[in-house]
Image (cartoon, rainbow, N blue to C red):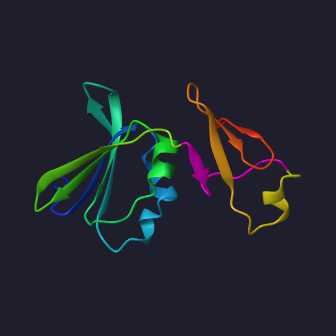
Amino acid sequence: MNIDSVTNGLVLDHIKAGRAMQIYATLGLDDLDCTVAVIKNVKSGKMGRKDLIKIDEMIDLDLDALGFIDPNITINVIRDGALVEKKKLQLPGELRDVIRCRNPRCITTLEQETDQVFRLAREDPPLYRCAYCETAYTGS
């Protein structure tokens, strides 16, 4: 299989195997006019298997959404074919409009214009709570 290298763009590396399509959908990468390569189940000495996403253009990424989906992702910034920056992610302290509150009585359910705000309550395993009603979100 031959996948071209990125000349000017981004490479999302160290994605937990199986999460690339979730990231693709969350970031709206299907709306881009540039080449986007999703590579799944790549052999990795460090992780066993991993996913990669190559974006052949510089775009703004929602780092909070990425950190929430997989805080171990590395973002490689490529300019003129050379790696110029590596960004490591972490679990965000606050999420805004990334996940939705499941509580039918929450203000965010009743007033659709209200932002969905969740705050990190515990890191391991990750637990977020709604800023308005304290409903827990564990990702399941």
Q: Nearer the viewer, residue 86 or 140?
A: 86
Q: Is residue 1 above or below residue 26?
A: above
Q: Position of residue 91 (x, y in %)?
A: 49, 39
Q: Nearer the viewer, residue 43 or 104?
A: 104
* Left or right of 50 on screen, residue 63: right
Q: Nearer the viewer, residue 19 or 113?
A: 113
Q: Position of residue 77 (x, y in %)?
A: 23, 54
Whether the magenta-drawn stretch holds residue 100 is answered as yes
Q: Is residue 44 above or below residue 120?
A: above
Q: Give the number of marks.
A: 0
Q: Quadrant of residue 6?
A: bottom left
Q: Position of residue 3 (x, y in %)?
A: 20, 53
Q: Residue at x 72, y 48 (%)?
A: 131
Q: Residue at x 46, y 44 (%)?
A: 67
Q: Residue furthest right?
A: 105
Whether the magenta-drawn stretch holds residue 2 is answered as no
Q: Residue furthest bottom?
A: 33
Q: Is residue 91 above or below residue 131?
A: above
- The stretch of residues the image draws in magenta is 93-103
* Left or right of 80 on screen, residue 129: right
Where, quadrant-wise, is the C terminus in this rendering? top right
Q: Quadrant of residue 89?
A: top left
Q: Residue at x 59, y 31 (%)?
A: 126
Q: Position of residue 90 (x, y in %)?
A: 44, 39
Main secondary structure along the magenta-highlighted residues: loop
* Left or right of 139 on screen, residue 65: left
Q: Residue at x 66, y 47 (%)?
A: 118
